[in-house]
Image (cartoon, rainbow, N blue to C red):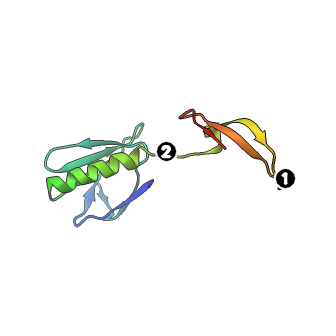
Amino acid sequence: VDSLKVPATRELRNSSAQKVPVHALVNILGCKVISGRNNTLKLKKPKSSVNVLLRFETALECVEWEHFLEEAASQRYVTLADFKIISTLPSTDPGRGLYTVRDRFSGDLVE
């Protein structure tokens, strides 16, 4: 999950006190999830001045969302640049190669 649609029953305001649409689309990958007072969570994106404040009706709801958001925020985008080619494997389909690669992030071998 790299995006989260946040429904709100009231208008939202950003840090400049500007009104924000009731539904916002937020990329949560790499966000830091900060637990606040009064059943609130703040999503803070590194190297960004934009923060999202989420307010929940109950403490239980806040804790459940905190766990979900932390897990979702810890995911990563995977691209070809994340892998180092170790070897080429024989293929029965001409023009296509099979490769053994190493994930640069985890060090795992993948075929």
Q: Quadrant of the C terminus?
A: top right
Q: Is residue 110 above or below residue 27?
A: above
Let me know if residue 58 appears in the view.
Answer: yes
Residue placed under numbered mark 2 in the picture: 76
The label on residue 95 is 1
83 sits left or right of 27 in the view:
right
Q: How far apart are marks 2 and 1 (CA)?
A: 30 Å
Residues 92 and 21: in front is: 92
Q: Which residue: 38% across, 43% down?
A: 31
Label 1 residue SS:
loop
Q: Position of residue 52 (x, y in %)?
A: 31, 50
Which three-letter amino acid code belongs to the residue tagged 1?
Gly
Q: Which residue: 84% across, 52% down?
A: 95
In the picture as drawn, the residue positioned furthest to the right comes out as 94
Which three-letter amino acid code belongs to the residue tagged 2?
Arg
Image quadrant assignment for residue 93:
bottom right
Tag 2 and tag 1, C-beta contact below 8 Å: no
